[in-house]
Amino acid sequence: MGVKKDPRLEFLRRTAPGTPLREAIDRIVLLGRGGLILVADRSAASPIIAAGFELNAPFTPQAIVELSKMDRAVVVDEDLKTILYANAHLVPSPSIPSQETGTRHRVAEQVAQQLGKLVIAVSEDSHQVTLFHGDWRYELQEIQTLLARVSQGLQILDRYRRELRELLTELAPLEFERRVFPSQVAAVLQRALYMMELERDVERTLVELGVHRELPERHLTALMRGVREEIELLVRDFKADSRPAEEILDELLSLPPEDVLRPDAVLRPLGITADQDLEEPIPSRGYRLLSKVPRLPISVIERLIEEIGTVDKVYRASRRQLDRVKGIAEARARAIEYGLGRFKNGYTATMDGF
């Protein structure tokens, strides 16, 4: 996919409920103590350690909790297998600016910026857990807060899915009459892009939920089932250039949020530009509708469109014309006539289960 992955999701996975590191953090919070944990290999950490003792002990949550009672930092390797140092006095470069007021958090921020490694600070007063990495700062959220955020996202996705289904169903009869306008294609793409962006937001929150993610993750999977496939077929139907639909879809997914709000920006990856008359209807090739005809492989659909043309021409084609296309015998010709006839008359033209 063309969407850039956030490398810091790995830090959220490592500190999610159910992980050994999160177990250690939760115990420190429960005891009402502060803590400072640096996740870095020896070669990176040792230059900034002014005091402390080398431990080289196996990583366990209980060991981290006990060592955190010494007030200074605990250093663990990046595989989370070995506790390298305990009671470590970390001395980052004083030239690194910090916006933090507390000593522990200020050191955490400076070390994270100097080393580019994950540093976890637990506040003794507020019990807040803060992750630092480079110039990134993130406060871990309560489970109930995360569940509420996911629930809200899923509710919005459910509404978007119903709206997308309606838009696609309304589009189908117009495809047979060559009355689909670019603005209508843009509206469908925009709704799908809103859904896929929101899906990414919910997935990021699910990472933080750890062992509590199973049920909302199932719900998310059900809500997004078939969306990408449906939109990829729509792109194949209406794209104005020869680029692969997958490439165009990746470009659409990479659009910044402000561009997704603009129909002209959404249509541009399809090769439909402002230079063209956006009020002129555009023909549909019919990939999306023909893919819903039972037992009609994509290879046959491609030959059908190549030899006969757009979906309106396929619909008007005689049995004899259909039979001439390789892979279409009498049974498939009947299925095509019946299936396209239903979609033309307003039958729900969306994917199974969509």
Image (cartoon, rainbow, N blue to C red):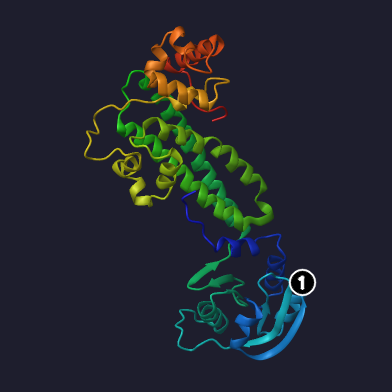
Please state if 193 lies on the left or on the right of 9 as rendered. left
Q: Nearer the viewer, residue 19 or 84?
A: 84
Near-viewer residue (220 or 117): 117
Image coords of residue 19 (percent x, y): 70, 62
Disc 1 residue crowd, few under 14, some 14–19, many 20+, Cα 10 Å: some
Locate residue 342 relative to residue 117 in the image: left or right. Answer: left
Residue 173 visible somewhere in the drawing: no
Q: Quadrant of residue 39?
A: bottom right
x, y (%) of residue 352?
A: 56, 27
Is 93 above or below relative to 247? below
Element type where label 1 sits in the image: loop
Q: Quadrant of residue 131?
A: bottom right
Q: How many numbered marks are there? A: 1
Is residue 86 visible in the rendered structure shown here?
yes
Residue at position x 21%, y 39% from top?
275
Q: Amino acid at mark 1?
A: Thr
Q: Splitting the image into 4 quarters, where does residue 344 fall?
A: top left
Q: Position of residue 80 (x, y in %)?
A: 70, 70
Q: Nearer the viewer, residue 184 or 274?
A: 274
284 up-or-down from 221: above or below: above
| Residue drawn at the location 46% of the way across and 41% of the way down | 246
Q: Is residue 343 left or right of residue 210?
A: left
Quarter of the C terminus within the rendering? top right
| Residue at 51% over, 18% down | 326
Q: Nearer the viewer, residue 217 or 283?
A: 283
Q: Residue furthest bottom?
A: 51
Q: Which residue is mark 1?
A: 60
* Residue 49 located left or right of residue 350: right
Q: Position of residue 36 (x, y in %)?
A: 63, 78
